Amino acid sequence: MKKHNLVFTALLGTSLVVGMSTVFAADNITTDAAKTGTTPISKSEISDPSVAATSFVEHINYARVALAMKNTDLAKQHITQARNMMEIIKAATAEQRIMTKVESGRIVYQYDTKYKFHYFPIQTGPVTVKQMSNGPIWAKNDLAVSDADVVYLTIDFTGNTAVTRLGEAETAITANNLKLADEHLAEIIEAVVKVDSKEALPNLKAHDNIALARSFITNQNYTGASYALKHADEALDDMQKKEKNKPQLDEITEMRKDVSTLQDYITKKDPGMIQKANTKIEKWWKDLTNWGKSAK
């Protein structure tokens, strides 16, 4: 997956490292704290607040998914890790707490919530999925996904909403009010995340949704892949109509046929054929990458 330039990407300067030492001394964050129960916090999360910020967004959204699964222990783990990320972010300057062009998977799951969007920043790694009930048995990690696409975010941690709402979410979980806890966590994302309203170029939209589909297929979430492919096909349709894409018209037409075929495999619940088609997905992604470079 590609990474975008953020407002801050440099490692913490000497003064911020000194500030961080008090965090470690207070045991608010440690390198061996569990990310999801077993995974340590990465060195990049500790050294770079931009990575910590995207991880924070990721953990909050995983906590919401865990609550939807009625798995309060997992939700608490992710909230704890969000707090760890918050300590790193707080050590940064106000200017450093704002990031732009953060590529993110925007996923909608089928459960009762008024906040339908869940964001998983892609530079933190592939969009890993967790199993929810009621998913089809042929896709072992299906999350009851009802939509999936790629968006670009501005993440702003200059306010205090995150810390307040985290505490409220934990209180709601203790009271076994999981829907209220979900709302508090969603309110954090509403406060710190803004989706860029500028429409991405069709080749970029196709490229990134193909990448998202690959991530879903790798994790055997074929329903999620289906929605990402739908958005990729919409972008390919736009590309077909543009004069500048005439040199690639035959390849785009063939790519759309292949996307349709893969969608058929998903509809027929044929995991074997879906996995075989993953090699074609890799080719589409590389072709779109090359076309994007040539268009510059």
Image (cartoon, helix red, strand yellow):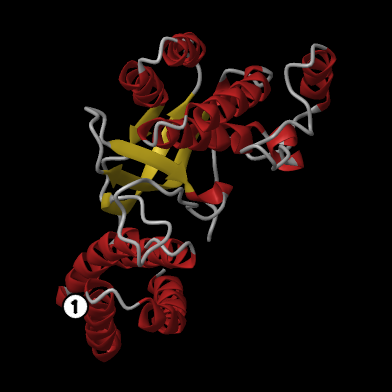
In percent of width and height, residue 35 lies at: 65, 37
In percent of width and height, residue 74 lies at: 53, 32
In percent of width and height, residue 9 lies at: 64, 40
Number of residue marks: 1
Q: In this view, does 191 lie to the left or right of 167?
A: left
Residue shown at 31% from the left, 54% from the top: 135
Residue shown at 40% from the left, 71% from the top: 292
Q: Is residue 235 left or right of residue 35?
A: left
Give the SS element for disc 1: helix
Q: Is residue 178 left or right of residue 38?
A: left
For label 1, count other residues whose C-alpha is less than 10 Å away and answer few (under 14), some (14-19) or many (20+).
some
Q: Which residue lies under the disc numbered 1?
A: 240
Q: Is residue 114 visible?
A: yes
Q: Is residue 8 left or right of residue 278?
A: right
Q: In this view, does 8 lie above or below 258?
A: above
Question: Disc 1 marks which amino acid?
Answer: Gln
Q: In this view, does 247 lie above or below 125?
A: below
Q: In which quarter of the image is residue 113?
A: top left
Q: Can residue 102 be seen in this view?
A: no
Quadrant where the C terminus lies?
bottom left
Q: Between 228 and 234, which is closer to the camera in this rendering?
A: 228
Q: Residue furthest left?
A: 241
Q: Is residue 267 above or below residue 196?
A: below
Residue shown at 56% from the left, 52% from the top: 125
Residue shown at 39% from the left, 30% from the top: 193
In percent of width and height, residue 8 lies at: 60, 35
Q: Between 91 and 29, which is closer to the camera in this rendering?
A: 29
